Image (cartoon, helix red, strand yellow):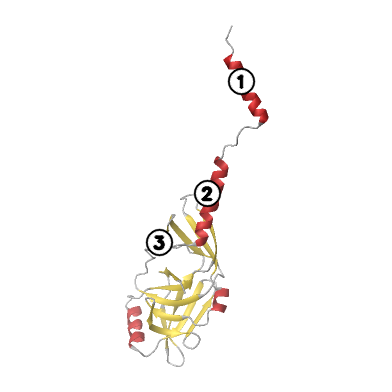
Amino acid sequence: MEREIRHIEDAELRTVTADDGSTHIVGYAAKYGVLSHQLRSKFGPFKEIIKPGAFDNALKRSDNIVASVEHNLQTKLGRMPKTLKVWSDDKGLAFDTVVPNTTVGKDALEEIRSEMLNGCSFGFTKNVKDTWAKDKATGMDIRTINEFDKIIDVTLTGSPAYPETELSIRSLDEFHNEIDKVAKTETKVEPPNDIQKKKIQLMELNSSKPKK
C-alpha cells in the first residue's frame, strides 16, 4: 500500500487527564482550508488545500488507524478503535489517543510538554479525489483534495517538514496534459480555405504586375 504523508504545524497539541485518571493526547493531524507549504512534482512546485469534509468518507473506510511518533509504526501510542479516536469536525482531522504506560508514551508526554513534539501529520493512500487550478498571481499549481480514500496513521512530529522527494501524482499529469492541449489549440494556425487562397493568389498577381 503506497502512502503519502502531509504535515501540520498548527496542530493544537495538548495533553488532558480524563475522569478515569488516564492521560490523553489530543490535537489535529490536518486542517481544512489551509494552504500547505510548497510541495514538489516533476512540473515544479505546487501547493495543496483540503476541502471541508474531505475526510468524512475516508474515516468510514479506515478502521485501523494508528497513532505514532514520527511515522514510526513501531512507536505506537494508540490504535483504533480501543485507544485512539479520529474524527472530522469543522476544523479538520481531529484525534484523541490514550497514552500508554510505556517508555514511548512517557517520552511522548515529556516531549509535548517541552515542545520538542509540536506538530502533527497524517498518512493516507494515494487514491484521492482532487481538482487542480493555476494561481493567477503566481502561476503555481494548486491542488484541492476533495476526498481522501483511506487514512493510515496520525503522528506526532518535531519540526514538520514537507517531503523533499518529488511527488508523482496522476491527476497532476492529466491537468498539465489538458493545459498543453488548450495551448496547442490556441496557437494552432489553420491553413487557408479556398476563398482565402483565391484572395492570396489575386494579391500576388496584382503585386507582380508592372507599375505604370
Q: Is residue 60 above or below residue 53?
A: below
Q: Which residue is mark 3?
A: 166
Q: Residue furthest bottom?
A: 20
Sequence-first disc among 2 and 3? 3
Q: Are marks 2 and 3 in contact (CB under 8 Å)?
A: no
> Residue at left 45%, top 58%?
46
Sequence-first disc among 1 and 3? 3
Indicate the amino acid at tag 2: Asp
> Residue at left 45%, top 81%?
66
Q: Residues within 10 Å of mark 3 (few under 14, many from 20)?
A: few
Q: Which residue is mark 2?
A: 180
**Residue at mark 1 to residue at mark 3: CA–CA distance:** 56 Å
Indicate the amino acid at tag 1: Met
Q: Which secondary structure, mark 2?
A: helix
Q: Quadrant of the C terminus?
A: top right
Quarter occupied by residue 53: bottom right
Q: Residues within 10 Å of mark 2 (few under 14, many from 20)?
A: few
Q: Which secondary structure, mark 1?
A: helix
Residue 51 appears at what percent x and percent y?
Answer: 54, 66
Q: Is residue 192 above or below residue 30?
A: above
Q: Which residue is mark 1?
A: 203
Sequence-first disc among 1 and 2? 2
Q: Left or right: where does residue 211 sit relative to residue 27?
A: right
Indicate the amino acid at tag 3: Glu
Q: Left or right: where does residue 122 sit relative to residue 206?
A: left
> Residue at left 43%, top 81%?
67
Residue 152 appears at what percent x and percent y?
Answer: 47, 77
Q: Residues within 10 Å of mark 1 (few under 14, many from 20)?
A: few
Q: Nearer the viewer, mark 1 or mark 3?
A: 1
**Residue at mark 2 to residue at mark 3: CA–CA distance:** 21 Å
Residue 4 appears at what percent x and percent y?
Answer: 44, 69
